[in-house]
Image: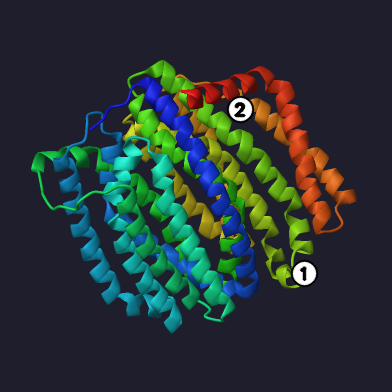
Amino acid sequence: MEELDIAAVTKRSIHGVIALVSRTFFVQIVNFVVNIFLTILFSPTTFGVYGVVLAVIAFLNYFSDIGLAGALIQKKDQITEKDLSTTFTLQQTLVISVSVIALLLSPVVGSFYRLPPSGILLFQALVVSFFLSSLKTIPSILLERYLRFEKLVIPEIVEILVFDTVVLVLAVKGFGISSFTYGVLARGIAGVITIYIISPWRPRFGFSKDVARKLLSFGIPFQMNSFLGLLKDDLLFAYIGKVLPFSQVGYIVFAQKWAFAPLRLIMDNIIRITFPSFARLQHDTKNLSIAVEKSLVALVSIIFPSLMGLVILGPYFISFLFTPRYLKWEPTLISLSLFAVNAAFSAISTPLTNALNAIGKIKVSLHLMIFWTIATWVLTPIAIWRFGFNGFALANAVIAFSVVYVVWLTKKYIPFSILPIFPSAFSTGVMGIILFFAAKYFVTNLLTTLLAIVFGAFIYFGILYFLSKDEMIEDVKTIKRQFAR
């Protein structure tokens, strides 16, 4: 199997970022439009049931991999067929066992959360989708390790389009929660078929004790990070589904979804590329440091102004978009702003912990995750008790300030600088002040709200260009050179 030099890593990383962002941008627009209609067609309670069931299913995902996929992507040496067959065998053994247990316990889950029959069927459909998703692991690893993201994005686009289409059509026809049930099944089947067309691999069983031992030495700590993330986020979400009404859970789902939208569009795509890219550069400290700085700048320069615009213009969208039915989401505005704070700091901390994992410092990031998990479980119940459902977002925002420690800790292993992100941060702050007062006096309807977005973007990029003209021009030249080869 092929190995990549620095030039190939650079070229494929740039191509991968552009391919993922550009090709998924269209899908995100479609998803955006669909979600607007779903928030009109569905009640907060329906969104709450869907969010709680997804959180329970996320618990199953922990047992599907035990970090083997991450171990194969991070592995310094070439991967072999023995690596792949061992990984596939271990994974399928775990997935099938967990799936059978989950299906047998579905009535218990439904009783615990007082789910309606349609909610239990949704849970069972997600279990089947969980099994189908496991079949995509090896073909995905082969594409991701060698940075073939222009191919890897195709099955994901197919899945999202199939899911959104099925859910929207059935929602219009009045299927309610069952719209999600049929949507996740259709998405799972479409994804498996597409990935094997894009990246053919013949599933085969086999086991090597030595291979398993080496992979698990990285995989188990890597998976512990995922497990703690599960406890910190998804299991906590399952907890609030028990202590809060489904309507308030729906408010949290709505606010978190919109505040994290820039992360899902930009950061998730860049993170997926930087993990294998950083892993390929782990022996080249100079180029690794440059890559870390560039990834931070790329994330911050887009996510910071997007979140600022979302917080300032969010109330106007809720006031003018599909009034009066959309006003049912007005109680989410405080949570939306607090989740935006969390998202902004995540744009810094997440790529840094990703870099630590990529260079093999998995135990360092594990210690960070332990701290975040404990802090989340201590602060969130207290905040919910004191401030209601808005306390969930408040606790998230407070914990996010630990980004300062993450920066200091990462610098011990990778000599990067945080200074390159300050032009974007400063430009965002100035844009926010100007946009706040401009919106207050000039935004009177949906059209002027949209014009305010254009105005804010003009202000932001104008200031950023003034502060970082030379760097921006050089980055554009670098991208052009990669595509000219």
Residue at image x 48%, y 51%?
376
Q: In the image shown, does 231 or 78 lie closer to the viewer?
A: 78
Residue 471 visible in the picture = yes
Q: Quadrant of residue 385?
A: bottom right
Horizontal and vertical percent position of residue 224: 31, 46
Judged from this view, the residue extending furthest toward the front is 484
- Type of residue at label 1? Thr
Q: How many marks?
A: 2
- At 57% from the left and 48% from the top, the residue drawn is 25
Q: Are marks 1 and 2 in contact (CB under 8 Å)?
A: no
The N terminus sits in image quarter: top left
Identify the residue at horizontal 83%, vertical 52% (top origin). 448
Residue 323: give its label.
1
Q: Residue 433's quadrant in the figure?
A: top right
Query: Looking at the image, is 125 positioned above or below residue 204?
Result: below
Left or right placement of residue 222 versus residue 177 in this view: left
Which circle marks residue 421 in the picture? Answer: 2
Q: Is residue 447 left or right of residue 414?
A: right
Quarter where residue 238 is shown: bottom left
Q: CA distance from mark 1 to mark 2?
A: 38 Å
Which three-letter amino acid code belongs to the residue tagged 2? Ile
Q: Is residue 236 above or below residue 79?
A: below
Residue 116 lies, with reference to residue 401, above or below; the image says below
Pick whichever, 193 or 309, lies toward us: 193
Q: In this rendered view, identify the residue nearer to me: 388 or 442.
A: 442
